[in-house]
Image (cartoon, grey):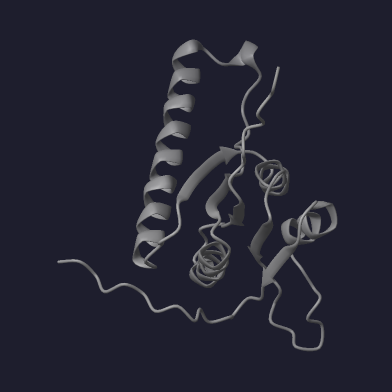
């Protein structure tokens, strides 16, 4: 009896925070690598979980409202990311992964079989200390099982954007 293992598609995982700091440069770098390597792109965004009351203090109506609000926020994030990636003319297959929780944990879980993780750094631009990283990029750089490409704050993307559609 012969078993055929399912072949995994190569994947580049990009973590974005949607703060407007430099997601375009991070997405551009990840799209370029995905194109060159023939990999799929997985865009990962972690929404920090809000503080919730213990179940005993929350009624079912309140819980439904919280879940509906979370679902709506995730849908808005996914739509914004799709729009942003589309403007960058993504020719790679792109998958979106929006989850609630710790960003480093979510990105590392998404990148278990990735060939590369691409992230932005949130350093203050201090040229004397280029190795200063934000906590998320530092956690990922330390714990990743694949290479990590860190795009410094202020980096300008090299890819030209697609003209806006009319």
Which residue shows up at 74% across the image and 84% down it?
Answer: 126
- Farthest residue in the bottom direction? 128
Q: Give above or below for 81 relative to 50.
A: below
**Viewer-proximal residue, 31 or 52?**
31
**Viewer-proximal residue, 71 or 108?**
108
Q: Quadrant of residue 92?
A: bottom left
Query: Total label count?
Result: 0
Using residue 103 as the reference point, say whether residue 84 is left or right of it.
left
Q: Give above or below for 20 relative to 112.
A: below
Q: Position of residue 110 (x, y in %)?
A: 65, 43
**Viewer-proximal residue, 146 or 62?**
146
Q: Position of residue 74 (x, y in %)?
A: 46, 40
Using residue 131 as the reference point, say whether residue 117 is left or right of it.
left
Which residue shows up at 57% across the image and 49% down it?
Answer: 44
Using residue 144 as the reference point, say whether residue 70 is left or right of it.
left
Which residue shows up at 80% across the image and 73% down it?
Answer: 132
Q: Position of residue 131 (x, y in %)?
A: 81, 76
- Farthest residue in the right direction? 142
Q: Position of residue 31 (x, y in %)?
A: 51, 65
- Farthest residue in the front direction? 1
The quadrant of the image that shows the N terminus is: top right
The quadrant of the image that shows the C terminus is: bottom left
Which residue shows up at 39% across the image and 68% down it?
Answer: 88
């Amino acid at each position: 009896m012969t078993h055929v293992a399912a072949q995994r598609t190569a994947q580049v995982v990009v973590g974005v925070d949607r703060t407007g700091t430099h997601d375009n440069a991070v997405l551009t770098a990840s799209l370029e690598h995905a194109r060159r390597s023939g990999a799929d792109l997985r865009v990962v965004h972690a929404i920090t979980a809000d503080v919730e009351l213990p179940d005993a203090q929350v009624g079912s109506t309140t819980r439904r409202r919280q879940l509906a609000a979370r679902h709506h926020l995730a849908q808005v994030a996914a739509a914004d990311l799709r729009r942003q990636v589309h403007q960058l003319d993504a020719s790679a297959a792109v998958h979106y992964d929006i989850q609630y929780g710790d960003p480093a944990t979510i990105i590392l879980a998404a990148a278990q079989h990735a060939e590369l993780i691409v992230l932005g750094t949130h350093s203050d631009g201090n040229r004397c200390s280029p190795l200063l990283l934000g906590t998320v990029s530092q956690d990922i750089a330390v714990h990743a099982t694949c290479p990590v490409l860190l795009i410094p704050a202020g980096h300008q993307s090299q890819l030209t954007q697609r003209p806006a559609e009319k």
